[in-house]
Image (tube, helix red, strand yellow):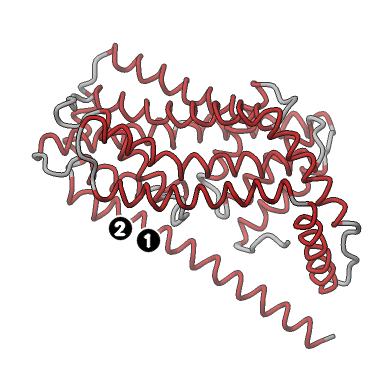
Amino acid sequence: MAAEDSGNAADQRSKRRRQRLTRLLAIAVILAVFGFIFPSIASYSAAWNDVSAMTAAWILALIGVTVLNLFTGWWFITTCLPGLSLPRAAAMNLSSTAVANTVPGGGAIALGVSYSMTSAWGFSTEEFTLYTLVSGLWSQFAKFGTPAVALLALSAVGRPSSQLVLATILGTGVFLAALGAVIWALHSENFMAVLGRFAQRAATKVMGWFHRSGPKDLEEAFLEFKHLAAKLIKTRGWLMSVSTLTSDLTGWFVQLACLRSVGVTAGEVSWEKSFAGYALIRLLTTIPVTPGGLGITEVGLTAYLAAGLGTGATDRIAAAILLSRALTFVVPIPIGAVNFAAWRWLRSKDGAASPGDAETERLMQAGVEGDPPKE
């Protein structure tokens, strides 16, 4: 038993080291990008001059398209979690986004924040789990499928780049494979039963390490989950698909509006090339090197869109990309932080508590201390 406990402690130390190395790598990438790589492509001061020269009309237009982008994201959430209102979807999305973009181990903690809020609103663990799985799948499907749409757009007006063709082939392959796996899993009772039995054995073994009994009847739970997922996709699959596509398009609208607002003409960057760059970078950032692709997105988009153009156009493109990232990545952070702080304060004032509150507190503590969340 002592040897087993020692092995578990060694595993935990190894996980902590890997997590710290991952964080250090992300910080190093961000510092290298914004401190060295990006300045070698464009001038920060020139980019700022382009942004500060925007007209009032363009500023209002950017505010409008940013709000639209947020709204469509909230709408997508409501399609994946039936019964959730749009205001609550906005509160949950802004709060989890603020945490994910700023707190160490943000992805897991953001999930805890969302769970805490939905459980307080009366949603069950099963409903939240289903929402998390389905919304995650649909978001990934969109990322892998978007390059194909961009390829069609570019093919209609000109010759697409070899990078886009390669990305389309890879993305479409992954998309079709994942879609096929999901369809098969939702139609196969045997597969879900086997998966449930495997999860039962794994959970029992892991909980045994901590001298606790594992969950019971996971096979039945997996089969029930399959039926719930199939029902949700059958009744709302088309709506989830439309809302996902709309959310993706409005994210690109922000980028295109930023390009035009700082003076980047259609002759320098067409809407087709802008969309292709948007699709390529979304596919690239499916590998989570930094939070939200911070640094990688800015350099990748600027380099792709400015290829073959002069210094002045490159500086304007850099200004547009930095501005669009500020509107989509930075703006939700302070709003979400205030929203989440107010929500927690009201919860503590009312003396109410939900199962998710303890989980969120544990995840936040783990993130601050540098410990990985315990499974």
Query: Residue 35: where, in percent of width, then height?
Result: 27, 53
Q: Quadrant of residue 240?
A: top right
Mark 2 Cα-neighbour bin, 10 Å: few <14, some 14–19, many ≥20: few
Total numbered labels: 2
Q: Is residue 141 above or below residue 66?
A: below
Above or below 218: residue 134: above
Q: Which mark is residue 340?
A: none
- Mark 1 element type: helix
Q: Residue at x 85, y 68 (%)?
A: 204
Which residue is identified by label 2? 32
The residue depicted at 35 percent of the width and 15 percent of the height is 61
Quarter of the image where the C terminus is located? bottom right
Q: Quadrant of the N terminus?
A: bottom right
Q: Quadrant of residue 82?
A: top right
Judged left or right of residue 12, residue 138 is left
Q: Amino acid at mark 2?
A: Ala
Q: Nearer the viewer, residue 349 or 38?
A: 38
User: Label 1 belongs to which residue?
Assistant: 28
Q: Are marks 1 and 2 in contact (CB under 8 Å)?
A: yes
In this view, the residue in front, 42 or 175, is 175
Measuring from the top left, give residue 279's x and y in whole percent.
37, 40
Residue at the farthest top position = 57
Structural distance between the alpha carbons of marks 1 and 2: 6 Å
The residue depicted at 43 percent of the width and 58 percent of the height is 26
Q: Position of residue 77 (x, y in %)?
A: 62, 30
Amino acid at circle 1: Ala
Q: Position of residue 208 (x, y in %)?
A: 85, 72
